[in-house]
Each structure stands twice: as structure tokens, then as C-alpha cells.
């Protein structure tokens, strides 16, 4: 399969690219910074801003499926990265006749998500970090989800919990809407997306993904994912 990966030079996109190539897929890595990706067999780099419809349309030519791992940092200002890229990508896919689309969103997009037994997270960290510091980011994620739901593509909204780095794929768990857990390793997130692309168990719905085998340092996670500059 020839897969377009948006956000290919980001932390999750790199895992997606590596795992897809290892599985024998061809990858079109869509990025604004081509110099950050090393040449490898099966890898094509397409230079494009994911919010530019013309550039996205050009990048999608000849691909069979689209995986988006685009992301943004917390900001007090209005964020449009997710919704603007969703518009450009879904329009480009419709023009090319491409159906499968998997897009990274967040468990926060599920209003009923409350991890079992996570009292400190549910009553302290979530209200402070996700609902306040990350308010504008998650508002745009919800706009993105609404735009994608309105299409006739074979979409899956992929909802991880708190993202962190881990060297190997674990025995992660998936569930419809959102998964009952606080953390998700990026390597597991990538693996779950590629497996879903093959199995298509969550077409036209949301898929929660969590990691339970290992846990990150919470303070480091908040700093790396929401505060530290790129």
C-alpha cells in the first residue's frame, strides 16, 4: 500500500513512517521540512503545508490511504492547524478518490472520557492542563473531528491519551470512542493506526488507544508535550 503520512517529521509521524516502511508499505512523507527525513527505500518526501489545498492535492497523487499525525503546541491564541488541515486533506482525498483516512485526535474530544481510578488526573491535571492550558488546541481538534465526520470517507478518529516516548511497541489496548487509561506511547499509537488500516475495525467512528504496560513521568510529559518550544 502507498500511504501518505502528514506530520511525518513529528514525533508520532516518525514512528508511523518507520513502522510502515518496516511492514513493506510505500510512504509519502508530507512535510514542510524535508531535510529532517533521511532517504530510505520506499520513502518519498513531498514538501507541502498541510493547510494548503493545492499542495496537499499534489502530494496525494498516487496514494491509497492517508494517515495524519499533525500536531500543535498549547497556545492562548486560536489554533486552526487541525481544522484547516482536515479541510485540505479531505478535499484532496475526495478529488483523488482516496477513501481510508486515520487522523490523530485526543481522548479529550470524548466529553465522557474519565479514566477509572485516576483521581488526581481527573480532578487536578485534566481541568488544569487539558481544559485550561490546552483549551484552544482541543477546541480545534473538535472542529477537525466535526469536519471529518461530515465527509463520506472511510475515516477513523484516533484518540490517544497523554502521549509519551517509549522504545518498543507494547500490548496496547483500543476501544471505541475512547480507551480507559491516562497514557499512550507514541510507538503504540503508530502501531494501532497501521493495524487499523489493515483490519478496519473502527471505520467511521473513533478509536481510543492506551498504553498500560509502562507509565511516563507526568511532569516531564506535560513539559514535553504542552510547554517546551519546538
Image (tube, helix red, strand yellow):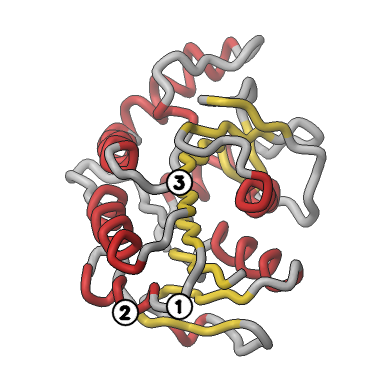
Mark 2 nearby-residue class (10 Å; few <14, some 14–19, many ≥20):
some
The residue indicated by pointer 3 is 154
Q: Compared with residue 27, is residue 80 higher up or lower down, i.e. above or below?
A: above
In the displayed structure, would residue 161 be above or below residue 82? above
From the top left corner, tell me how far across and down residue 7 is, in percent: 45, 64
Lateral position of residue 148 relative to residue 100, left or right: left
- Binning the other alpha carbons within 10 Å of mark 1 as few (below 14), some (14 to 19) or many (20 upward) gives few
Q: Which residue is mark 2?
A: 58
Name the residue: 23% across, 47% down.
Answer: 79
Q: Which residue is mark 1?
A: 62
User: For residue 94, what is the image quadrant?
Assistant: bottom left
| Label 3 – label 1 distance at C-alpha | 18 Å
Could one spot residue 194 in this view of the protein? yes
Up-down relation of residue 161 to residue 46 (above or below): above
Task: Determine the residue positioned at 66% across, 32% down.
Answer: 174
Q: Is residue 161 visible?
A: no
Q: Secondary structure at mark 3?
A: strand
Mark 3 or mark 2: which comes first in sequence?
A: 2
- The residue at 52%/50% (across/down) is 224
x and y, in percent, of residue 48 in the image: 33, 77
Q: Image quarter for residue 88?
A: bottom left
Given residues 54 and 180, the one toward you in this image is: 54
* Mark found first going from the N terminus, 3 or 1: 1
Residue 209 horizontal/vertical position (percent): 62, 35
1 vs 2, front mark: 1
Judged by depth in the image, the label closer to the viewer, 3 or 2, is: 3
Q: Looking at the image, which is closer to me, 186 or 22?
A: 22
What kind of element bears circle 1? loop
At mark 2, the secondary structure is helix
23 with respect to 140 (left or right): right
Q: Quadrant of residue 148?
A: top left
**Relative side of 63 to 39, left or right:** left
Amino acid at each position: 500500500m502507498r500511504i501518505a503520512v502528514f506530520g511525518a517529521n513529528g514525533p508520532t509521524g516518525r514512528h508511523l513512517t518507520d513502522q510502515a516502511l518496516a511492514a513493506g508499505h510505500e510512504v509519502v512523507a508530507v512535510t514542510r521540512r524535508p531535510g529532517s527525513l533521511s532517504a530510505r527505500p520506499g520513502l518519498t518526501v513531498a514538501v507541502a503545508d498541510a493547510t494548503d489545498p493545492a499542495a496537499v492535492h499534489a502530494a496525494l497523487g498516487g496514494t491509497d490511504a492517508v494517515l495524519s499525525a499533525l500536531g500543535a503546541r498549547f497556545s492562548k491564541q486560536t489554533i486552526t492547524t487541525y481544522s484547516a488541515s482536515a479541510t485540505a486533506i479531505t478535499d484532496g482525498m475526495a478529488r483523488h478518490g482516496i477513501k481510508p483516512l486515520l487522523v490523530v485526535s485526543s481522548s479529550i474530544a470524548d466529553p465522557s472520557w474519565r479514566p477509572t481510578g485516576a483521581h488526581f488526573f481527573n480532578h487536578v491535571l485534566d481541568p488544569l492542563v487539558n481544559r485550561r492550558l490546552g483549551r484552544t488546541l482541543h477546541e480545534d481538534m473538535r472542529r477537525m473531528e466535526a469536519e471529518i465526520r461530515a465527509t463520506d470517507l472511510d475515516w477513523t478518529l484516533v484518540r490517544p491519551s497523554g502521549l509519551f516516548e517509549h522504545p518498543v511497541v507494547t500490548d496496547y489496548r483500543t476501544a471505541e470512542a475512547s480507551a480507559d487509561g491516562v497514557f499512550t506511547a507514541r510507538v503504540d499509537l503508530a502501531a494501532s493506526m497501521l493495524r487499523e488500516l489493515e483490519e478496519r475495525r473502527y471505520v467511521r467512528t473513533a478509536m481510543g488507544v492506551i498504553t498500560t504496560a509502562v507509565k511516563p513521568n507526568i511532569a516531564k510529559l506535560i513539559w514535553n508535550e504542552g510547554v517546551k518550544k519546538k
